[in-house]
Image: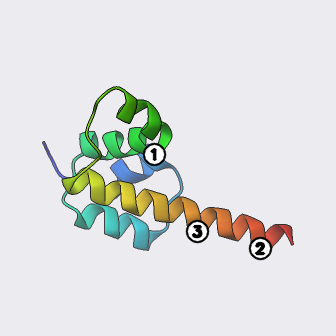
């Protein structure tokens, strides 16, 4: 399991700023862990209902980064709509 590259992050998440890419790579996560974190963001209620424990470790760190990224995007959209 190789650590993530910039290309892995961009191919998985789409357009991402360089700081966020660096934060994600700095976690030492793999592509599989990034995909799992993305699944948590999209389906956290479903995953919890299926009995899976909350994301922890590197996946948990990635979830935190992705949630922060979403919140920043939403705040930017709100400001531009005003």
Relative side of 8 to 18, left or right:
left
- Give the labeled residue for mark 1: 41
Q: Residue at x 27, y 50 (%)?
A: 59
| Neighbour tally class for label 2: few under 14, some 14-19, many 20 plus, Cα within 10 Å | few
Label 1 sits on a secondary structure element that is helix
Residue 5 visible in rendering: no
The front one of 63 and 17 is 63
| Neighbour tally class for label 3: few under 14, some 14-19, many 20 plus, Cα within 10 Å | few
| Neighbour tally class for label 1: few under 14, some 14-19, many 20 plus, Cα within 10 Å | some
- Give the labeled residue for mark 2: 79
Gap in angstroms between the C-alphas marked 3 and 2:
11 Å
Residue 71 visible in rendering: yes
Gap in angstroms between the C-alphas marked 2 and 1:
23 Å
Quarter holding the N terminus?
Answer: top left
Q: Position of residue 42 (x, y in %)?
A: 49, 40
Q: Position of residue 35 (x, y in %)?
A: 34, 40
Label 2 sits on a secondary structure element that is helix
The front one of 70 and 51 is 51
- Decide which of tag 1 and tag 3 comes sooner along the chain: 1
Label 3 sits on a secondary structure element that is helix
- Give the labeled residue for mark 3: 72
Where 5 falls versus 46 (above or below)?
Answer: below
Q: In the figure, residue 71 lies in which quadrant?
A: bottom right
Q: Residue at x 37, y 54 (%)?
A: 63
- How many marks the image carries: the answer is 3
Q: In the figure, residue 28 lies in which quadrant?
A: bottom left
Q: Position of residue 15 (x, y in %)?
A: 54, 56
């Amino acid at each position: 399991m190789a650590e993530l590259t910039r290309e892995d992050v961009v191919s998985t998440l789409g357009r991402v700023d360089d700081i966020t890419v660096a934060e994600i790579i700095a976690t030492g996560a793999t592509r599989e862990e990034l995909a799992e974190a993305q699944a948590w963001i999209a389906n956290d209620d479903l995953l919890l209902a299926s009995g899976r424990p909350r994301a922890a470790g590197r996946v948990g760190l990635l979830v935190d980064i992705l949630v922060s990224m979403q919140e920043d995007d939403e705040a930017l959209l709100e400001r531009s709509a005003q």
